[in-house]
Image (cartoon, helix red, strand yellow):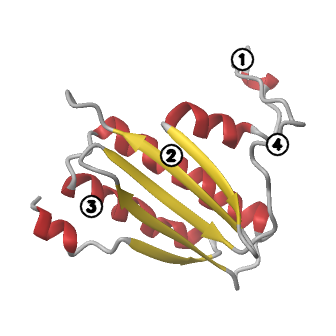
Amino acid sequence: MSENSAQSIPEKLTLRSRLEDLACVFPWVESLAAAYAIPAGKLFAMNLCLEEVLSNIVRHGYRCDPNQTMTVEFARNGDREFSFIVEDSAPHFRPFDPAVPLEDVAPAALEDIVPGGNGIRLLRKFADSVKWEPLEPGNRLTIGFWVPESA
C-alpha cells in the first residue's frame, strides 16, 4: 500500500467501554500493518497487546461501565518504529509498581496460572517498549514495536 493509501487510515480510534466495541481494533491494525509493511509476527504482537490492554480497561478500569470512552492512537517514529498510545479516564492502575514483583518465570502447568499480573507480563514479552503515564484523570500507556531491517 502506498503512503497516500496510509493517509486514508485514521490515526486515532475512539472506543466506547464495551468489549464488543473492541472488534473494530483488529481490522484497523491490520490496515496499518498493510500500509506500513509490518510483518505478520509484529501484527500478531500488536493485536495481542492491544486486546489485552483495552479489555483490561473495560473490565477492570471502568468495571464494565459502557458509558466511558478510551482512545487508541497510532504513531510512527521513522520507518521501523511504531507505537500505540492508549488513553482512558479510569483510575490510575500503576502497571509497573515496584512493590508488586513480576515473575518472569513461566508457570509449569496451566493449573499454576493465577489471575492478575499476567497482562503486564504479556506486554513485556510481545512489545518492544511499554511506558505508563498518569493523566488527570486517567492513564496513558504507550506500547512500542520495532521492525528490524530484514523483516
Between circles 4 and 2, the one closer to the viewer is 4
Q: Residue at x 82, y 42 (%)?
A: 97
Mark 2 highlights which residue?
48
Residue at mark 3 to residue at mark 2: CA–CA distance: 16 Å
Q: Residue at x 81, y 68 (%)?
A: 91
Q: Residue furthest bottom?
A: 67
Q: Which mark is residue 73?
A: none
Residue at mark 2 to residue at mark 1: CA–CA distance: 20 Å
Q: Amino acid at mark 3?
A: Ser
Between circles 1 and 4, the one closer to the viewer is 4
Residue at mark 1 to residue at mark 4: CA–CA distance: 18 Å
- Is 80 drawn above or below residue 77 in the view shown? above
Q: Tell me which label, 1 or 3, sits earlier in the chain.
A: 3
Q: Is residue 90 left or right of residue 86?
A: right
Q: Amino acid at mark 4?
A: Asp
Mark 4 highlights which residue?
97
Residues at discs 1 and 4 in contact (Cβ within 8 Å): no
Q: Which mark is residue 105?
A: 1
Residues at discs 1 and 3 in contact (Cβ within 8 Å): no
Callout 2 secondary element: helix
Q: Amino acid at mark 1?
A: Val
- Is 3 drawn above or below residue 43 in the view shown? below
Callout 1 secondary element: loop
Callout 3 secondary element: helix
Mark 3 highlights which residue?
31
Residue at mark 1 to residue at mark 3: CA–CA distance: 35 Å
Q: Residue at x 56, y 70 (%)?
A: 20
